[in-house]
Image (tube, grey):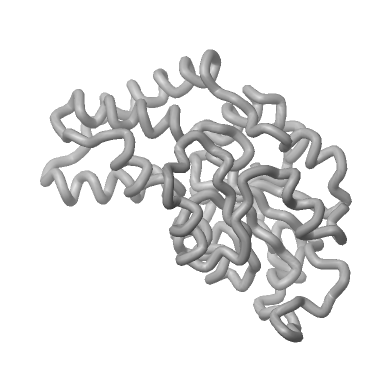
Amino acid sequence: MPHDPEAAGMVLHRPAMRDGQVLSQNWPGLIIFDCDGVLIDSEIVVCRLTAEEFTRLGYRVSTEEVIARFAGRPEREMIADVEADWGRPVPEAFFTRIRARVEQAYATELEIMPGIADLLDSLRAAVCVASSAYPAKLKLGLDTVGLYKRFAPNVVSASLVAQGKPAPDVFIYAAGWMRAPTADCLVIEDSVPGVRAALAAGMRVFGFTGGRHCAPGHRERLLEAGAEQVIESFSDLRHLIPAAF
């Protein structure tokens, strides 16, 4: 994981536009991928386990509610919301159990998102990962499906920044780490908080609905949040961003 922001070269501005189109023919210079629900089909797994563990402790919540309330946000913010709603601290046993169960489930249930390996093989644009997941879980998920070495060391966790999504911090950090102007970046995101974070960072963003956690209406929610396009398959990117290939 990177530890030095090294933000030299980071430029916070919108790209020059004409008729709604970026003038640069080289955009995007950097594609920033969210991890859970974009690179790996993990949200449905982790949200199910989270709902089960909270319910076991007495805080009754469904998988669908966990997805709607917490997908795309850092764990620390989820815990703060639950504690405020529940009126009591989440016991330490929750963290021990959920991490053990996620590790076990990743070994048996986790799937790589279809088409991502082929996409990475054909892209000439720079790529990195910016995720709300804590570093160990982020590395575990990418390692399990064989993607970690394809991105490392350009893998950024929101634990490195002050605020998680929908704040722009993790995307600004990632752009600085990659020495890319924010206006040259395209973010691929599956969550409403992630879309809002990318826009707040001055980046363009495409929504992604290829994960099993994406229920009917999710495409519309991503568009309402400000996603420029919403794709269901990575094969859609070739005609949307031809300069990246």
Image check: 64 left or right of 126?
left
The quadrant the N terminus occupies is top right
Position of 41 with respect to 29 (left or right) is left
Identify the image quadrant of residue 49: top left
Q: Is residue 103 left or right of residue 84?
A: right
Question: Which sits in the foreground, 113 or 82?
Answer: 113
Locate residue 14: give its quadrant: bottom right
- Residue 55 in percent (x, y) is at 20, 28
Task: Residue at the far front: name it.
Answer: 216
Q: Horizontally, is 20 left or right of 93 in the view?
A: right
Q: Is residue 140 above or below residue 66?
A: above
**Which residue is pictured at 55% across the width and 23% down the height?**
110
Q: Residue at x 74, y 77 (%)?
A: 21
Above or below for 190 versus 22: above
Q: Residue 204 or 231: which is nearer the viewer?
A: 231
Residue 124 pos. (x, y %): 88, 51
Please, which residue is most extreme toward the left here?
Answer: 87
Residue 172: quadrant of the picture: bottom right
Position of residue 203 measured from the top left corner of the image (x, y, whole percent): 64, 68
Evaluate whether residue 36 shows in this view: no
Given residues 37 and 160, the one toward you in this image is 37
